[in-house]
């Protein structure tokens, strides 16, 4: 099982980024997916959820209305569109599922830095 996150970088406050996460080694379309983030000195937190079909999504209050999670099951990829970024969004972002054979796996993450 592998998760490979990409798309992070340095962006000014108010800017946008689109993160991607390519999954392999399990039947991606059978499982919900989440995006997590870990800011320096803080615990890892879940920020977005998407059901296996993409029909249902949910967001942490801190990102609701600014972030959008989506997925392409044909490409085994989940995305996170991040708009109106704030300095407090600075973190390493990870994707994963908490179920099935991929439950224990984490990727290397992608670093998002929001700074002027």
Image (cartoon, rainbow, N blue to C red):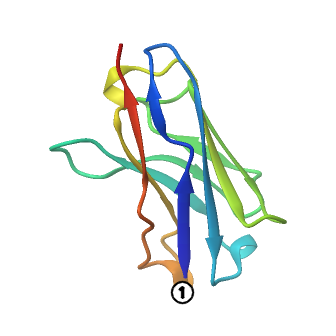
Instruction: Please state if 28 lies on the left or on the right of 48 as rendered.
Output: right
Residue 116 vertical placement versus 23 (above, below): above
Q: Nearer the viewer, residue 70 or 25?
A: 25
Q: Residue at x 47, y 30 (%)?
A: 63
Q: Position of residue 25 (x, y in %)?
A: 63, 84
Question: Crowdedness of circle 1 by 10 Å Cα count: few (<14), some, many (20+)?
Answer: few
Picture quarter containing residue 22?
bottom right
Q: Residue at x 48, y 71 (%)?
A: 98
Instruction: Please state if 102 lies on the left or on the right of 26 as rendered.
Output: left
Q: Position of residue 54 (x, y in %)?
A: 75, 54
Q: Residue at x 15, y 44 (%)?
A: 41
Q: Nearer the viewer, residue 72 or 15?
A: 15
Residue 8 vertical placement versus 22 (above, below): above
State how many labels appear.
Answer: 1
Direction left: furthest residue: 41
- SS label for mark 1: helix
Q: Position of residue 107 (x, y in %)?
A: 45, 67
Picture quarter containing residue 73?
bottom right
Q: Nearer the viewer, residue 109 or 46?
A: 109
Q: Which residue is mark 1?
A: 101
Residue 93 vertical placement versus 52 (above, below): above
Quadrant of the snapshot with the N terminus:
bottom right
Q: Residue at x 55, y 51 (%)?
A: 6
Instruction: Please state if 99 lies on the left or on the right of 87 as rendered.
Output: right
């Amino acid at each position: 099982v592998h998760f490979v996150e990409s798309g992070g970088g340095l962006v000014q406050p108010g800017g946008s980024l689109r993160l991607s996460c390519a999954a392999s080694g399990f039947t991606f379309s059978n499982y919900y997916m989440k995006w997590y983030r870990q800011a320096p000195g803080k615990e890892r937190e879940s920020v977005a959820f998407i059901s296996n079909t993409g029909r249902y999504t949910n967001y942490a209050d801190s990102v609701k209305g600014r972030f959008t999670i989506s997925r392409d099951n044909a490409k085994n990829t989940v995305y996170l569109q991040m708009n109106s970024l704030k300095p407090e969004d600075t973190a390493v972002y990870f994707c994963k599922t908490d179920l099935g054979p991929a439950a224990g796996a984490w990727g290397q993450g992608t670093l998002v830095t929001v700074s002027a």
